[in-house]
């Protein structure tokens, strides 16, 4: 499948980053090439095959609902780009 | 051999006999680092002061008569996607350049409890996406066997450090071959254990259904010792398997008579470099001489594993990497005058500026595969092919105990050589990705050289057959001397301390 520049723009927007014109052209060619390579899979008939998402038999794991020691406030905010009192500061939303 | 050339089990013996202290050993490793690090560039962060202090504390404990484990006092390096409390963990990405975790990964807690002396954090392709460390946002690591060649990736920093004597052993991660491929390129042992054998808690996720942590070591005994230390159930990882504790060194018996080894002919296709093919075939002959029964076999859907892997891995990555948004940790973009951007612009600019080209490429590919209208044709299709690959392996393991193949299709390539040809670059993990799709264990062990560059032999086993892999690899290794070879690194004089290099702490 060949991707259009518009589709690449849309993918970048969904991935939440911006691309300049050169990048759009480059990714357009590269992603199209990779997608064409993956289309090799269409040679296989998978009509009656169940998908595998996890290789181990997965069951829900629950822990006991017990009080635990949380991280200290200092640890929680250690990497905060911006902090105000005991909050992460973010740009205005409204 | 120099001290820094010795495997962990030999060093442990010397330490036990009082011939060397943990402090002396740690200093020897740092002296080696200051000698060769300018050439190799394996470390993103060096933690010399903490390591010397930890080694000193262990020496005091040993002196006081405390009984210590076999890896106590041995310097170990960590791939920089493994969280270390109080030591920055960058994933070799700008977005986490100044990220300092508030907790240790479970495997780091285990290492520390066993007296491991952590030398520092090692370079990788950004977020473990790549095969050469050329995708590191900071610098590429060089192959100790030939400085103009890549060390492999994504665990290129850890593999190069172990091969160069800058760490005695290391821990890395493997999503599609990221331990085995660099191990092969650097002439050491690298194992991807069964999915679920080792806790992933605190290891930054790339593709969560494929990622697995594992050891990079100078020989097979060290691999078994490291596995002893890090394997086991962890309540903090919901995908961690509950299994009885095993002593993996008990498999190192040097006997493999009667073991049935399959040789899938699809792994010896036209993509394979003839020098690598020669070394691997010689290795297979050696296994026969040791009494193993080898037989050619077919892995019928081998060629579909690699494209299926690229869809599944990128789909999971696009979801995992959504968390890096500049809000609670990591890099955040500001406006030109240093003030706040509006929220949407902050997200967009943060990720535009701080994620690298390969990461963006994979996020877009994964987003495409998961997007409405294409989900069935790409992601669902690949997930079904994953079942077919698992079934292929299951059928082969009815007949064989182990499969053998080359680890990579060629020896280490030169820097830049594959930068413009993505599909050729991606194909350096042609023989490794199927193993991750099936969640089974595999290891790479040195089996020769191609024009001075190491070649790796891959052994693949059914789920939780690490013991059998180690048994076979050990017998193989003990009947040759490739694991004793060390790269011809001259090193520079030790006058310039790496501690003074920019970006190091």
Image: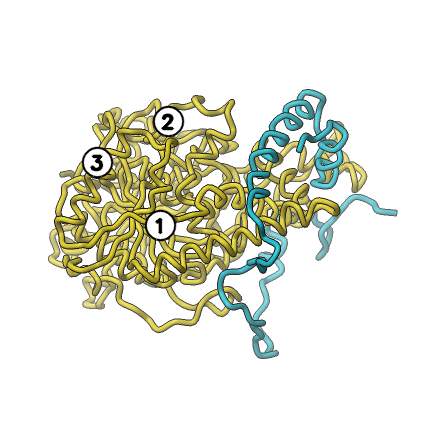
Whether residue B30 is visible, yes or no, is: no
In this rendering, the answer to whether A9 lies above or below B107 is above
Query: Gap between marks 3 and 2, in whole Å?
Result: 16 Å
Q: Chain of mark 2?
A: B
- Residue B376 in picture, x, y percent from top left: 67, 50
Whether residue B44 is visible, yes or no, is: yes
Q: For mark 2, what is the residue?
A: B413
Q: Are marks 1 and 2 in contact (CB under 8 Å)?
A: no
Marks 1 and 3, the one that precedes in the sequence: 1
**Residue B448, numbered label:** 3
**Which chain did the renderer colour cyan?**
A
Query: Gap between marks 1 and 2, in whole Å?
Result: 30 Å
**Which residue appears farthest toward the right when viewing the image?**
A94
Q: To which quarter of the image does residue B337 belong? A: top right
Circle nearer the viewer, 1 or 2: 2
Query: Gap between marks 1 and 3, in whole Å?
Result: 30 Å
- Residue B17 in picture, x, y percent from top left: 11, 57
**Residue B118, numbered label:** 1
Q: Is B482 displayed left or right of A35 in the figure?
A: left
Q: Chain of mark 3?
A: B
Element on which disc 3 rests? strand
Do the residues marked 1 and 3 share a common chain? yes
- Give the position of the C terminus of chain B as an image quadrant: top left
Colour scheme: by chain
Do the residues marked 1 and 2 share a common chain? yes
Element on which disc 1 rests? strand
**Which chain did the renderer colour yellow?**
B
- Residue B258 in picture, x, y percent from top left: 18, 60
Q: To which quarter of the image does residue B155 belong? A: top left
Circle nearer the viewer, 1 or 3: 3
Marks 3 and 2, the one that precedes in the sequence: 2
């Amino acid at each position: 499948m060949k991707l259009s520049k518009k589709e690449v723009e849309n993918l970048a927007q969904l991935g939440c980053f911006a691309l300049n014109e050169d990048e759009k052209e480059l990714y357009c060619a590269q992603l199209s090439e990779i997608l064409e390579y993956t289309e090799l899979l269409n040679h296989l008939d998978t009509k009656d095959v169940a998908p595998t998402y996890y290789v181990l038999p997965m069951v829900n794991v629950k822990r006991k609902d017990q009080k635990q020691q949380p991280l200290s406030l200092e640890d929680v905010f250690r990497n905060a780009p911006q902090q105000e009192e005991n909050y992460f500061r973010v740009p205005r939303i409204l | 051999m120099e001290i820094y050339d010795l495997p962990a089990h030999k060093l442990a013996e010397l330490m036990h006999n009082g011939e060397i202290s943990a402090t002396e050993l740690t200093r020897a490793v740092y002296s080696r680092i200051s000698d060769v690090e300018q050439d190799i560039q394996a470390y993103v962060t060096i933690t010399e002061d903490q390591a010397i202090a930890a080694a000193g504390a262990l020496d005091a404990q040993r002196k006081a008569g405390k009984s210590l484990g076999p890896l106590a006092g041995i310097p170990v390096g960590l791939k920089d996607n493994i969280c270390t409390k109080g030591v920055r963990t960058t994933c070799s990405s700008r977005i986490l350049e100044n990220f300092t975790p508030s907790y240790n990964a479970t495997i780091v807690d285990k290492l520390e409890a066993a007296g491991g002396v952590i030398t520092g954090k090692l370079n990788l392709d950004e977020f473990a996406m790549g095969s050469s460390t050329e995708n590191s946002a900071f610098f590429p690591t060089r192959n100790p066997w030939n400085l103009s060649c890549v060390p492999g990736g994504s665990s290129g920093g850890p593999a190069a450090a172990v091969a160069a004597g800058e760490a005695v052993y290391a821990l890395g991660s493997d999503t599609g071959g990221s331990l085995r491929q660099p191990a092969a390129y650097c002439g050491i042992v690298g194992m991807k254990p069964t999915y679920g054998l080792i806790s992933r808690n605190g290891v930054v996720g790339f593709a969560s259904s494929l990622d697995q942590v594992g050891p990079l070591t100078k020989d097979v005994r060290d691999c078994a010792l490291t596995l002893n230390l890090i394997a086991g159930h962890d309540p903090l990882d919901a995908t961690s398997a509950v299994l009885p504790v095993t002593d993996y060194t008990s498999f190192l018996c040097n006997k493999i008579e009667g073991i049935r080894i399959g040789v899938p002919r699809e792994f010896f296709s036209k993509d394979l470099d003839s020098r690598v093919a020669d070394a691997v075939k010689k290795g297979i002959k050696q296994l026969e001489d040791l009494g193993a029964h080898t037989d050619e076999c077919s892995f019928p859907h081998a060629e579909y594993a690699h494209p299926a892997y690229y869809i599944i891995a990128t789909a999971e990555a696009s979801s995992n990497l959504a968390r890096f948004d500049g809000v609670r940790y990591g890099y955040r973009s500001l406006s030109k005058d240093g003030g706040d951007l509006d929220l949407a612009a902050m997200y967009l600019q943060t990720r535009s500026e701080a994620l690298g080209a390969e990461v963006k490429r994979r996020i877009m590919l994964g987003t495409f595969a998961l997007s409405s209208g294409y989900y069935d044709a790409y992601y669902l299709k690949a997930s079904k092919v994953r079942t077919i690959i698992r079934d292929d392996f299951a059928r082969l393991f009815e007949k064989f105990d182990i499969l053998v193949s080359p680890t990579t299709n060629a020896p280490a390539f030169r820097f830049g050589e594959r930068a413009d040809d993505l599909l050729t670059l991606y194909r350096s993990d042609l023989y490794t990705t199927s193993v991750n799709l099936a969640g089974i264990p595999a290891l790479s062990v040195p089996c020769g050289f191609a024009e001075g560059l190491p070649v790796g032999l891959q052994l693949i086993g059914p789920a939780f057959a690490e013991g059998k892999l180690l048994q076979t690899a050990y017998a193989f290794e003990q009947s040759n001397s490739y694991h004793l070879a060390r790269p011809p690194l001259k090193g520079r004089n030790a006058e310039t301390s790496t501690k003074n290099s920019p970006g190091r702490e």
